[in-house]
């Protein structure tokens, strides 16, 4: 795009500015010396240069070969005064042509010498612009915002008592920030926000008038609950801080928010990665931390494994005080003056928790049994005395791609999670609690770009094998809007 420059640019003297007519004469000279003849194809390069104009063929030839450019409105504006910088730019573009003969090259070399200082300035500007673009791209890539918004509806029925649980009906947002520090380290943050539908769940207040419903983990109140750092270099990686972590392909042994760290080191000569970790679940009143090792990766052409062992900081059957509030009472021994009144104080629970197991392990495997069909299985066991095993089997058919409208996937699952058959497994928003046995079928579909619709149906026995056992029927449908 030719741009009008200030008259002070270029060398001193009266020859600092040229007219388009002189440029056109130079264009004819270039064309005359070129080995390529003019060939007007009927498509005008400039709307304000008629075909019967004496310079039409020269300008059309130069425009089609990238030597000159017009304005964004398609005009040439041949009567406008041109600066030396514009003439230098034309010369530079002409010099890039590969079909010039000796005569044409000689003329252009003389022009290049004439406009040498302007060409040097233009090259410096191009280099600076290229460097600025690179810096801007790097700055943009250092900061990334992504996540999704979900609308979810559950028809969650206790078929024995004929009651519905509406606590999962909600608007939900998962907001994530990735802030690149350098080529190794990245700072990450995650915010979760739950907004339940009106009258969709119970709300309760404690004696101090503070709402306590749904304050799980760090609370889904829109704050940044999770902040951690990640490092990656030569296949090795580390995450450190408060983050969501999982063990096993389906996160049955552990799938929860935790404080701690986890690292991975590739094993030379294999496709396996060895891992170590220390992490403490952030559930209210929890005083347990876990440490252990893991291994995952491919062990064959079509067979993947994921195994882990974790040990608890608490002993088996060890009791402890959670520190949670049991109730509130009036403290009659410490009146407040003035006026004379007695404060309401909390009374904490005493030895209200018992750790039923001291360790656990998971063995996971996955393989493709046919085109678009993948089977995944997890087996978990702890050292608890009762219901210390968990099994999760999953069959996947195809899968969705967020940028591929119409892509879809289907799955079928069987789960049997013992009451003490995990350490802190992923309950998948209440659809697969421990003490659950049953099956799930689901379907995923991409109706619009970056939008995924999922619907699942499940029949389960909750608290199976206990006096509280009941039959559950769950229908869940949700839309995720990814950004």
Image (cartoon, rainbow, N blue to C red):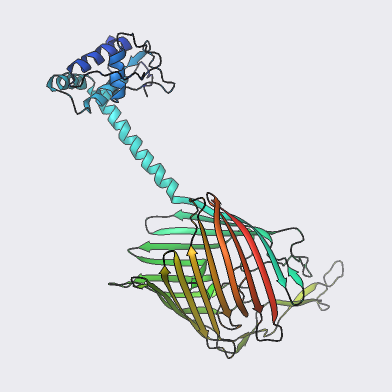
Q: In this view, does 482 lie above or below 269?
A: above
Q: Quadrant of residue 352?
A: bottom right
Residue 274, position in %: x, y? 37, 74
Give the residue at x 72% y 71%: 157
Residue 211, position in %: x, y? 74, 65
159 relative to 147 in the view: left or right? right
Q: Is residue 300 above or below residue 75?
A: below
Work out whether residue 248 can be spotted: no
433 relative to 371 in the view: left or right? right
Give the residue at x 63% y 67%: 457
109 relative to 370 in the view: left or right? left
Q: In which quarter of the image is residue 419?
A: bottom right
Work out whether residue 97 can be spotted: yes
Give the residue at x 62% y 87%: 319
Q: In which quarter of the image is the N terminus?
A: top left
116 relative to 210 in the view: left or right? left
Q: Quadrant of residue 425?
A: bottom right
Residue at the far left: name it: 102
Give the residue at x 53% y 70%: 259
Relative to the observer, which residue lies in front, 456 or 200?
A: 456
Residue 57, position in %: x, y? 29, 15
């Amino acid at each position: 795009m030719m741009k009008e420059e200030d008259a002070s640019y270029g060398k001193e003297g009266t020859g600092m500015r040229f007219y388009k007519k002189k440029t056109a004469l130079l264009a004819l000279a270039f064309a005359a010396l070129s080995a390529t003849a003019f060939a007007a194809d009927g498509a005008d390069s400039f709307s304000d240069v008629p075909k019967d104009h004496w310079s039409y063929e020269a300008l059309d030839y130069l425009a089609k070969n990238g030597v000159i450019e017009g304005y964004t409105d398609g005009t040439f504006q041949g009567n406008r005064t041109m600066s030396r910088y514009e003439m230098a730019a034309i010369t530079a573009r002409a010099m890039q042509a590969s079909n010039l003969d000796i005569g044409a090259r000689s003329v252009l070399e003389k022009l290049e010498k004439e406009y040498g200082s302007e060409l040097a300035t233009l090259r410096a500007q191009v280099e600076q612009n290229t460097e600025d673009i690179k810096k801007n791209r790097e700055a943009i890539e250092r900061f990334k915002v992504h996540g999704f918004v979900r609308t979810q509806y559950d028809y969650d029925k206790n078929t024995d008592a004929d009651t519905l649980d509406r606590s999962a009906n909600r608007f939900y947002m998962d907001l994530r920030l990735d802030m690149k520090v350098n080529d190794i380290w990245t700072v990450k943050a995650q915010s979760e926000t739950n907004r339940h539908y009106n009258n969709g769940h119970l709300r309760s207040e404690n004696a101090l008038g503070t709402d306590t419903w749904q304050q799980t983990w760090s609370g889904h109140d829109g704050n940044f609950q999770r902040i951690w750092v990640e490092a990656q270099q030569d296949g090795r990686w580390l995450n450190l801080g408060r983050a969501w972590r999982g063990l096993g392909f389906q996160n049955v042994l552990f799938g929860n928010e935790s404080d701690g760290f986890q690292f991975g080191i590739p094993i030379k000569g294999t496709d396996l990665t060895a891992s170590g970790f220390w992490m403490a679940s952030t559930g209210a009143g929890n005083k347990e931390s876990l440490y252990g090792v893991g291994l995952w990766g491919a062990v064959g052409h079509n067979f993947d494994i994921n195994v882990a062992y974790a040990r608890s900081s608490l002993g088996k059957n060890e009791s402890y005080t959670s520190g949670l509030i049991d109730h509130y009472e009036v403290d009659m021994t410490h009146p407040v003056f003035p006026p004379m009144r007695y404060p309401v104080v909390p009374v904490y629970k005493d030895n209200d928790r018992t750790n039923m197991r001291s360790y656990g392990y998971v063995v996971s495997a996955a393989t493709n049994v046919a085109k678009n069909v993948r089977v995944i299985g997890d087996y978990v066991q702890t050292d608890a005395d009762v219901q210390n095993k968990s099994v999760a089997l999953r069959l996947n058919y195809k899968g969705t791609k967020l940028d591929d409208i119409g892509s879809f996937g289907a799955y079928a699952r069987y789960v049997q999670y013992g009451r003490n058959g995990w350490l802190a497994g992923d309950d998948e928003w209440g659809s697969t609690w421990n003490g659950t046995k049953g099956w799930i079928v689901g379907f995923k579909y991409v109706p619009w770009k970056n939008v995924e619709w999922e619907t699942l149906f499940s029949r389960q026995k909750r608290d199976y094998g206990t006096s509280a056992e009941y039959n559950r029927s769950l229908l869940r449908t949700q839309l995720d809007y990814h950004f």
